[in-house]
Image (cartoon, rainbow, N blue to C red):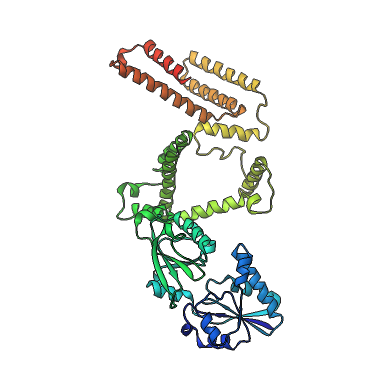
Amino acid sequence: MKKILVLGLGAGDINQIPYGVYKHLVEAEHVFLRTKEHPVVADLEREGMKFTSFDSIYEKHSDFPAVYEEICETLLAQAENVDTTVYAVPGHPLVAERTVQLLLEKGPERDVTIEVGGGQSFLDAMFQALKIDPIEGFQLVDGTDLSKEMMHLKTHTIIGQVYDRFVASEVKLSLMEKLPDEYSIAIVTAAGSKEEEIIWIPLYELDHKVEVHNLTSVYVPPVQQEQILYREFSKLREIIAELRGPNGCPWDKKQTHVSLKKYLIEEAYELIEAINEEDIDHMIEELGDVLLQVMLHAQIGEDDGYFSIDDIIEGISAKMVRRHPHVFGEVEADNVEQVLQNWEQIKQEEKGGNIQKSLLEGVGKGLPNLLKAVELQKEAAKVGFDWKEIGPILDKVKEELREWNEAKDNHDSTEMELEFGDLLFALVNVARHYKIDPEEALFKTNEKFSRRFRYIEEKVAQNDKPFAEYSLEELDAFWVEAKKQGK
């Protein structure tokens, strides 16, 4: 069976290469190198190593995956012609070497055995050069495939594969989404060799003050400043846990799911207000307040041993994937109507098909009653219980108003309340027919009333006379002025 022997060139000079690896390299008829840009290559060449490098392939392609694919295919094709093909890579073959992973994946499919030899990882040299202990927490990430989500700010982080200024620039931009521009990082070049160099720079200089090449790695020290960690979800979780912990806040420790209900409603409405005002800063603040309510409920659940924020996140993630088969599965949905139809079908299947006692069971649960009225009517309309024209709807409004007047004339306060509810319900139907959000409409009216009343207050204050000394006619005159100004 054909074989590819993969060897590591180590991280430093020739004296750090294991003897067995050294013998293979200098005694092999021919060695393929991923790159000849490595400190030991010149020494090995003097010792008699004959090689071909794949550096020219890097110049052919615009992205690294294509480079790695061609190197892999070239080696597998070579392996068909000889018993053993020797392939050497920087460092250790199983550390930050995508070509080796591709060989391990594709070799068996081509009846080629992939044997991995030794070699010193560049990580050993990095730990020694930076004087860090990975037991404190450590992560290694690929600079060519870095995103902010990969970063764990409280650990030592080494970013490899920082081959050129373009990669350095992408790494910088990803890091700057999590860290201050001036955050101190280290550029480590040729760790473990005679050319080893460590330069500490502010993050923003990463791609324009330092030369980078294939022996360059970036080191990001663990974040010590609490304020930098405030953007991290894990930090928020720690803060909430501490607030409810033994030495936490008496108010937070006292709260229950029931006691927090009113605050969740208040914060939701304040968020809606910020959205209506198109005030981004206010939205950020109010979204934070809503998230705080979620976190408090989650912490209470964790303290009581019933659930945690992890369960909440898992539940909503699973639901979103399950209910969006047109995104995460094979189902097709070309428009919003199809999406909603799929959503409702999946929702019914989750609830056990037809076990629901009533079509309206659970509809609008927990919503303010004005919004609940909308949802109840929409649900009934799905089975045809709805007027198609506005005429009968307006007739219903008139009928309910007439019945309310009758209750008023009879001085029946209980019946007046019921008929007033019927009138509101009928008006909701009018709003729904014209695609008006009744909650939004009432909100705008409230805002308008507040604005005009503030104008009245200003006029009263200008005249240095208390409200009580104004007649209703005088105040109404101010109202008319405010109304004209509003228009």
Q: Position of residue 353 (x, y in %)?
A: 65, 47
Res 145 seen here: yes
Indicate the quadrant where residue 235 lies.
Answer: bottom left
> Can you give x and y, in whole percent of width and height, for residue 456 in the image?
37, 19
Check the image and name the residue furthest to the left.
464
x, y percentage for residue 183?
A: 38, 58
Whether residue 306 is visible to the viewer of this picture, yes or no, is no
Q: Examine the rendered structure and indicate whether residue 261 appears above or below residue 446.
A: below
Query: How many labels were placed on the picture?
Result: 0
Q: Is residue 340 above or below residue 113?
A: above
Give the left or right position of residue 376, taking residue 255 as reference: right
Looking at the picture, tell me which residue is in the foreground, 145 or 352. Answer: 145
Tell whether 67 sits left or right of 152. right
- Give the quarter of the image for residue 76: bottom right
> What residue is shown at x 42% (from left), y 49% (from top)?
297
Nearest the viewer among 464 and 386 is: 464
Identity of the residue drawn at 44% across and 78% down: 193
- Residue drawn where x is 62% and y is 38% of the image: 359
130, above or below 62, in the image: below
Q: Position of residue 136 (x, y in %)?
A: 39, 69
Give the quadrant of residue 88: bottom right
Q: Tell me: 100 left or right of 81.
A: left
Locate residue 221 relative to residue 41 in the image: left or right. Answer: left
